[in-house]
């Protein structure tokens, strides 16, 4: 472990995120953090997942911030790295995010005021909106969770509303999650089995099972240093594999979902052919079959820890074409099949 920090007697907020080969985006990230108001109350916990370039050297040389750099000997993935970071954090509040976001300087001033205003119950999770770099298009502004495990922001790429809005949402964003350290630990953090992607969906479902409300807002906005979301083979594999894990871990009455799962998989198989990822999809099915006993144990342990299961009616039941991605969201054949699927489910 390497620590690079200034004296800071009382930390209120810990910013936590993993780094991996991110020197280029970290430059803008760290400089935006450096300009935050009340910086003396903020620490930065970065878990480097065995970067293969000069990322670690860059982080060690950035002495203007209160940084706790935790070096790993292998890539632990987003979920486990964040858990380690939270355990090493000192703040009452934690903000979990990514290495490639840019903060406005009044970000936490606004967030703390809003958090105190919304905290009508013991615990809440607050997730500020995120826009893509350059076009102000929505990356996250609340999200839906479908009972088949899909989680998505239907308004993705649309312009963020100018009117300030704050509202309840089903899904928190792992790239923009503000809550108390105590709550994160009480909910057992992210499930490291997810490695990357959908760990925030699983966490949101556990929050729902514990009656913890999730809010989103555009009163303050993060900028994601990307212009769009790129679905490569690795992200496709983990997003879809972990979608099944979210269902198996958290939903009640799996037998009743089987017909809907079969229908949706027929549609997604066709979609995987169109985007040339049929081989990846078959690998996901192979994984689920080979690890059936492990997944069954994960489900058992999940329900042993939290008695309440998520009922189908608590989640969204209508699928949006945005699940197909930006390039195919207007495909006539896919949309027709999706309408048929929505009729049955």
Image (cartoon, grey):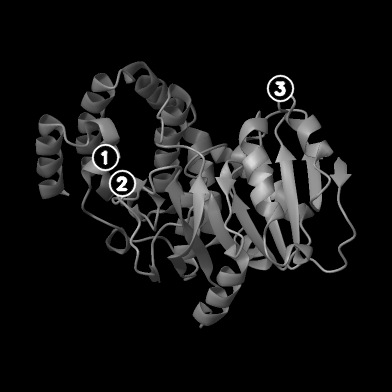
Viewer-closest of 12 and 294: 12
Q: Is residue 313 above or below residue 71?
A: below
Q: Is residue 15 left or right of residue 221?
A: right
* Residue in the image at 63% along x and 31% along y: 24
Residue assigned mark 2: 148
Q: Nearer the viewer, residue 11 or 40?
A: 40
The residue located at (23%, 37%) in the rendering is 264
Percent position of residue 306, x then y: 53, 62
Tell me: residue 338, above or below residue 218.
above
CA separation in Å, label 3 and label 1: 40 Å
Indicate which disc residue 52 carries. 3
Image quadrant in which the N terminus is located: top right
Q: Is residue 214 above or below residue 230?
A: below
Please tell me which of labels 3 and 1 falls first in the chain: 3
Please name whichever residue, 10 or 71, is drawn nearer the observer in this view of the structure.
10
Residue 335: give x, y in percent of width and height: 13, 37
- Position of residue 200 measured from the top left corner of the image (x, y, whole percent): 50, 50
* Dot 2: element: loop
Circles 1, 2 touching at the beta carbon (< 8 Å): yes
Are the residues tagged 3 and 1 within 8 Å (C-beta)?
no
What numbered label is drawn on residue 261? Answer: 1
């Amino acid at each position: 472990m390497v620590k690079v920090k200034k004296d800071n007697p009382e930390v209120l907020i810990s910013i936590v995120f993993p780094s991996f080969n991110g020197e280029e985006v970290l430059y803008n990230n760290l400089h935006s953090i450096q300009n935050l108001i009340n910086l003396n109350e903020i620490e930065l916990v970065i878990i480097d997942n065995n970067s293969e370039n000069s990322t670690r050297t860059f982080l060690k040389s950035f002495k203007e911030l209160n940084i706790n750099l935790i070096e790993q000997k292998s890539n632990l993935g987003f979920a486990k790295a964040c858990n380690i970071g939270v355990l090493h954090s000192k703040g009452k509040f934690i903000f979990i995010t990514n290495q490639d976001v840019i903060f406005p300087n009044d970000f936490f001033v606004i967030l703390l005021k809003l958090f105190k205003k919304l905290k009508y119950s013991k615990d809440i999770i607050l997730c500020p909106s995120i826009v893509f770099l350059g076009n102000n298009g929505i990356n996250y502004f609340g999200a839906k969770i479908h009972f088949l495990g899909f989680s998505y922001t239907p308004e993705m790429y649309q312009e963020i509303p100018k009117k300030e809005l704050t509202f309840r949402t089903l899904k928190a964003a792992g790239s923009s999650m503000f809550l108390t350290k105590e709550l994160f630990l009480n909910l057992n953090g992210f499930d490291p089995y997810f490695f990357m992607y959908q760990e925030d969906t699983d966490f949101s479902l556990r929050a729902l099972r514990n009656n913890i409300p999730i809010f989103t807002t555009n009163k303050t906005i993060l900028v994601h240093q990307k212009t769009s979301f790129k679905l490569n083979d690795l992200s496709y594999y983990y997003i879809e594999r972990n979608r099944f894990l979210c269902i198996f871990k958290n939903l009640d009455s799996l037998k009743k979902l089987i017909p809907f799962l079969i229908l949706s998989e027929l549609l997604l198989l066709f979609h995987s052919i169109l985007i040339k990822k049929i081989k990846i999809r078959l690998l996901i099915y192979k994984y689920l079959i080979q690890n059936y006993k492990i997944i069954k144990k994960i489900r058992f342990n999940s329900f042993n820890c939290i008695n309440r299961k998520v009922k189908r009616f608590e989640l969204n039941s209508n699928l949006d074409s945005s699940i197909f991605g930006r390039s195919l969201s207007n495909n006539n054949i896919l949309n027709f099949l999706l309408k048929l699927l929505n009729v049955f489910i």
